[in-house]
Every structure is written in structure tokens, then in C-alpha cells.
Image (cartoon, grey):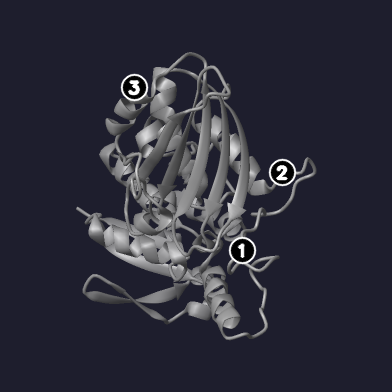
Amino acid sequence: MGIKVSIVGATGNVGREFLSILEERKFPIDELFLLASSNSEGKKISFGKKELKVLDLKKFDFKKCQLVFSSAGSKVSSEFLPKAAKAGCYIIDNSSYFRMDPDVPLVVPEVNSDDLKNIKKRIIANPNCSTIQMVMVLKPLHNLVPIKRVVVSTYQSTSGAGRLAMDELFDQTKSIFGNNPIKKKSFTKQIAFNVIPHIDSFLEDGKTKEEWKMEVETQKIMDESVKVTATCVRVPVFIGHGESVNIEFEKEITEDKLRDVLKKSPGISVVDFRKDEGYVTPEECAGEDKVYVSRIRKDNTLKNAISLWVVADNLRKGAALNAIQIGEELIKKKFF
């Protein structure tokens, strides 16, 4: 028996990935509703052998569905998702709006699926894309040897800022090769052939909101005792986030033991050869479901520290795939 599903933000980058992954994983759908703004109403989008029309979110009656996947930004989430919950739907939201609500579980299924026992508002939050791939690696290690502190620098692709941001990278690259003026819209600085140490808005203490998200979300998912400091950087890549992660443990852990634990952890692939091409890059992880770990080595400046490199497809495991895995967990736990 299938489930009546709706996708809020069906025409966006993550919305399209929702459709692709739902089909790939043969998610049990009885009826599917594609929702977006009135600007997209009537557009046709393929799903399997069908062509579905996009419906106006503002006109949609959520009593028609049981499960909502949403990726349309915090403003849309704040306005429409409580209405969907009131109509009896379970909602998996990819925006940041509900993530730090104490009554809303923040879930990465391989890490903390037990938190789905505590759904109070019928809403489950999908973590930030960079947080997801990092906690996938941190949690099995923390279970073995408690983590004291994490220092992470991210290298985040333009798709994390939306389709128009990807277009801007493409257009600026063409303009540079054609010796034409650069136009900036999505980013505050030129993104082509450049890196921008600024994602989301600045906070009073000098952090950006993206950096703050990584810190507090990691603690909510894992353990409040884990200290995290992040520097988040936008890079001229279309899909795939990279992270340089330095982990300080409470006790010693060897490189070999760390590799062994990660190799046995679901959703992780260790590709760590100390030679040319013996690591994974964002370009190679695009379209893949796993989180890849490379460049594992001891940090000799601290007593119990190890550095490593983590990459994942931010549109898949960093967003749509993680949300759909949450939906699969809800089915297993007989929420429908």
C-alpha cells in the first residue's frame, strides 16, 4: 500500500533530486503532488513514466496527503508546514526554520534515527548539508572514543545556494573567457575562479549563520559536549561539498582503528591511499549517495588528534536523500 506524498519546492534543485531519488529507491507512493509558487503552476515535470503538473502551494489542501517533503526555504516552511501538520501530515523539512526547535527532531538516519520516537509537532528537520556529511563521520568515532573538539573548514559548492547561483558561476566563467563584464547577483563577490569565505548572514560575534548552524546542529544531533568551530567557504564548484576536518579526541585513537570503524559504518566509503588520485573530490562524488573519507592522518600538534577530508553530494545525502531516508524510517516504524 502506497503513501500520498507531496513535495514543496518541487521545481528547485533539491525538489528535482527528491523526484529522482524517490523513483530510484522505489518509495511506496500512491499519489504524488508537486507544489511550488504560482509562477510555476501548470508546469509539467516527469516522474517515472508520468508527467505531473505543478500545483500552486497556496491553493493546496494538505488533507489530500500523508507525507510532505519540503525544500522551499524558511519563509515557506514557517507559513505552510504548520498548516500541513494541522491537516494530519508528517513533514520532513529541509530548511533551517525548525532545526533548533526542541520539539522537532533533527535527524540523520544512520546517526540518530531513535530521535524519531519524539515527534511532537509532526515535523522532522533535515540538518544542514555540511552538518550531515560531517556527523556521519563523527558519530561512529565518538561512539568509540569521545570527541573533545572539532575544527572544520568547508568548501561548499554553488548548488547549495540554489539553481540561480549555479547559473551565476556558469555565466561568470563564460564572461571571463569572453572578456566581458562580470555580473554579481547571488553572491557578494565574484564566484568564478574565486572562493568566498561567507555563507549566509553575519552574526554579531563574527561568525556567519552557516558556521553557527554547523556548531549547534552537531551538538543537537550528537552530544552537547562536542565543541565545534567552523569556517564555511563557497567555492566555484557546481555540486559536491568538501570538508577539512580536524578532530581532537579525549583519548588516543590510531589511524588504523579510525579507518576500520569508518569502513564498517553505514553510508560511508573510505578511499584513502597515500598517492596521486588516492582520495575523492567533490566532482567525483556528484550523483553518489555515500559520504567519502580520505586523507586520514595524525595531527602531531595535539596529543589525540586526527585530520581527514570528507566529501559528499550536497543535493543527495546533504539534502534530498537524507530526507527520503527519514521517510523510509517513518514507514519502518509504522507511522503510516
At which x and y percent is residue 58? 54, 69
Mark 3–mark 1 distance (CA, rounded to whole Å): 37 Å
Which label sits in the foreground, 2 or 3?
3
At mark 2, the secondary structure is loop
Q: Earlier in the sequence, mark 1 or mark 2?
A: 1
- The residue lying toward the viewer, choosing from 145 and 123, is 145
At which x and y percent is residue 236? 54, 63
Q: Amino acid at mark 3?
A: Lys
- The residue lying toward the viewer, choosing from 119 and 304, is 304
Q: Residue at x 49, y 70 (%)?
A: 36
At which x and y percent is residue 126? 47, 46
Residue 228 sits above or below residue 158 on the image: above
- The residue lying toward the viewer, choosing from 313 and 1, is 313
Question: Which residue has dot 2 on it?
Answer: 207
At mark 1, the secondary structure is loop
Mark 2–mark 3 distance (CA, rounded to whole Å): 34 Å
Q: Earlier in the sequence, mark 3 or mark 1?
A: 1
Which label sits in the foreground, 1 or 2?
1
Q: Amino acid at mark 2?
A: Lys
Question: Which residue has dot 1 on it?
Answer: 194
Question: Which residue has dot 3 on it?
Answer: 257
Do the CB atoms of the residues marked 3 and 1 lie less than 8 Å apart?
no
